[in-house]
Image (cartoon, helix red, strand yellow):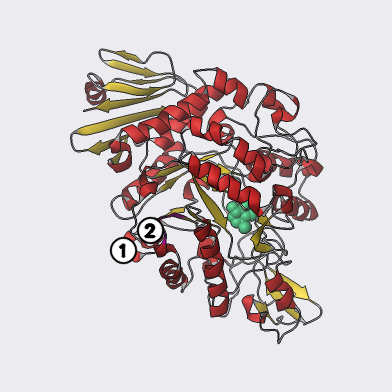
Amino acid sequence: MEQTNWWKKSVVYQIYPRSFYDADGDGIGDIAGIAQKLDYLKELGVDVIWLSPVYDSPNDDNGYDIRDYYKIMDEFGTMADFDFLLASAHERGLKIIMDLVVNHTSDEHEWFVRSKSGRDNPYRDYYYWRDGKEGREPNNWGSIFSGPAWEYDEASGQYYLHLFSKKQPDLNWEHPPLRKEVYRMMKFWLDKGIDGFRMDVINFISKVDGLPDGAVEEGALYGNGSPYFMNGLRIHEFLREMNEEVLSKYDILTVGEMPGVRVDHAKAYTAPENKEVNMIFTFEHMGLDSGPGEKWNLEKLDLVDLKENFEKWQKGLHGVGWNSLYWNNHDQPRIVSRFGNDREHRVLSAKMLATCLHMLHGTPYIYQGEEIGMTNVRFESIDEYKDVETLNMYREKRGQGIPHEKIMESIYVKGRDNARTPMQWTSGPNGGFTDGTPWIGVNPRYKEINVEKALEDKDSIFYHYKHLIGLRKELDIITTGDFNLLYRSHPALFAYERRSGDEKLVVLCNFGDEEIELDEENLIHEATGAEVIVQNYKEVQLEQSRLVLRPYETVVFLKK
Ligand code: NOJ
């Protein structure tokens, strides 16, 4: 099938169905709820919806533990609801991509149930089963969700591998029948007419033979197995096979979630001639506010690091592969609380952050609520948290004697439930998310921050996003132009230009709450005679030889 690369000009909106909109009043978002909000997404102007998993699941990890790939989760509705959603989206010119979670399944998936039923079962090799070593786990790897990465099965006397929770056993991609089953399932969804896949931790599917022990970093309880399961030996072979068997037969968007990937890996994964995936989600920029070891170690962001990181990716993939651009998703805290100021400068800083990302080269992703500037949440008690990663970490660290308050501080800043509180639609009860009792608490700021208010206010963050999305459609330079970092060492100014032929965009973003005065001849020369196409203050303070950027101010100049 001819690949038209339509996704190069698209903006994607991610929906976490559990928290988006509850149409039936059971406190859990659902597919019918999404269908009711399509016109809202149309108004925003996005092109593609990425649905986090909607498949049948016991919800140990909110759907990232799939029990049946061919069935919709009861709480979310039925296959008929899904078909209706897809048709309604297509009617409006919206595309839908699905989450493809095939590094692991639920331990309640039929394959695992069979696999566990005995060493001789034909499904045994669908997963990683190993004998213990000297009465312990087969190796020293820690699970990404705390504890060891192995679970013992009494009945067969062997352990199975789970890089995530023990209810998420890892699939064995070395086993050809498993790969065939995955491809069959992918075709089932693509033949329904979905428009692509976001592939969950897809660079974990090739593990190094022998599964050797990992190095134990200082203070860690377990070995770090990631060098042996990230970007493994056969990963390109597996992705090319998947491409040949499935992806190449459709004109779709594919984005691989890939922790631990550098630019050189990304080139190999996304260069079109390699026929693997269109783009990947990288993590480097999301790790810059963590200390060594793990995400829970808090560190202040150094803006220069962030700028240079973007520069590396923008330059590295330009003309070679393709970037995906994101600040937020269901695993990340809210960006306005993270790199902005979610109090007195919430609106300004949310618009600035949006501008900074959306003027870059690549495909932007917006996570539900980002477009209205939703913020992190601070629940009093650990019992109000629902995320398996957060809860396991809390238990493990308490066990190590770390004080409750210190752990909560990390959760407030980095916990995944920051992104998972219900979408704030109105200032009514539960932020208009549900008539029932929400499965997780609503962020108490819903009265001030909600869609209803955003739609009424022409200066809202929502309309700023809409404007940025519109510009991407209007100006090819945003899709094609190259990237140059400006003011490299400035600690609060993120500035860059994009060039294409004689055209040029200059993007200025003040990441701090102090004024920045720019009086360099060059910039002013560029700015005079240029058109201001984005701003977040009423007027741009540009005088003859001076440009002043106020707190969190952003300005984009277009020069033809
Ligand atoms: C990445 C997903 O984004 C995350 O939510 C999930 O917990 C893990 N993969 C495991 O599937």
- 515 over 135 or under it: above or below: above
Residue 400 x/y as whole percent = 77, 55
Tell me if I can see residue 491 in this picture: no
- 393 over 327 or under it: above or below: below
User: Where ligand 1 lies, by quadrant?
Assistant: bottom right
Compute the Cα span from label 2 to label 1: 8 Å
**Residue under numbered circle 1:** 273
Say which of 32 and 403 sits in front.
32
Task: Decide whether the magenta segment is chiefly helix, strand or loop.
Answer: loop
Q: How many callouts does the rendering have? A: 2
Say which of 425 and 149 sits in front.
425
Residue 306 left/right relative to 519: right
Residue 384 x/y as whole percent = 79, 41
Residue type at tag 1: Glu
**Residue under numbered circle 2:** 270
SS at mark 1? Answer: helix
Residue type at tag 2: Thr
